[in-house]
Image (tube, rainbow, N blue to C red):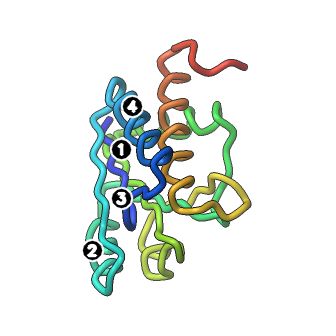
Amino acid sequence: MYITIVTIGQPKLSFAKEGFGEYIKRLEGFHKVSVVHIKDDAQADKKMLSLADAELSIALDEKGKMFDSNEFAVWIDDFDRTGDHHLTFFIGGPNGLSDLVRQRVRYTIALSPMTLPHDLAMLFFAEALYRASTISAGHPYHRN
């Protein structure tokens, strides 16, 4: 499976930047992964919208569907089984995703019902993707 993560901006906090990079590196052991950091400027929405037409686009928003780790792993696996081999995830900036982007994507999921700071959302999501991948692979990282 090919996974693209599109974010507005990059992690700024050193622990988030380091952790995000570490989980992306680990994730590459399971999937082809690319990360697109879009500069938070007047053109950001336009750039996000051009990428939202991807094969399967998914926004991260606190109002989206919530999963536990096992459910998230199954949800991702279901796409692969049905032929959707490229997932593109969108993480908004400090002001979240625009209404235009949220309307364009096919799915919206939530990491938490609480609003997370941008840096933590990126780190949290990278770990959640890695955890889901290890669950699917039968790797002992996740403990039930």
Q: In the rendered structure, which disc, 3 or 4, sits on the residue that comes first in sequence? A: 3
Mark 4 surroundings: few (<14), some (14-19) or many (≥20) residues within 10 A: many
Please report the residue visible at 45 percent of the width from the left and 48 percent of the height from the top: 14
Residue tagged 3: 6
Query: Could you tell me residue 105's position as x and y percent?
Result: 44, 67
**Could you tell me the amino acid type at mark 2?**
Lys
Residue 120 image label: none
Question: What kind of residue is marked 3?
Answer: Val
Q: Give the mark nearest the N terminus, 1 or 3.
A: 3
| Residue at mark 3 to residue at mark 4: CA–CA distance | 15 Å
Mark 1 in CB contact with mark 3 (< 8 angstroms): no
**Which residue lies at the image location 65% right of the left edge and 56% below the top edge?**
65
Picture disc at residue 84? 1
| Viewer-side label of 1, 3 | 3
Q: Upstream in the sequence, badge 2 or badge 4?
A: 4
**Whole-number angstrom distance, CA of label 1 to CA of label 4:** 18 Å
What residue does disc 4 label?
27
Q: Are marks 1 and 4 in contact (CB under 8 Å)?
A: no
Kindly identify the amino acid type of the residue bearing the numbered disc 4. Answer: Leu
Q: Mark 4: which secondary structure?
A: helix
Residue 47: mark = 2
**CB within 8 Å, label 3 to label 2:** no
Q: Picture quarter containing residue 33?
A: top left
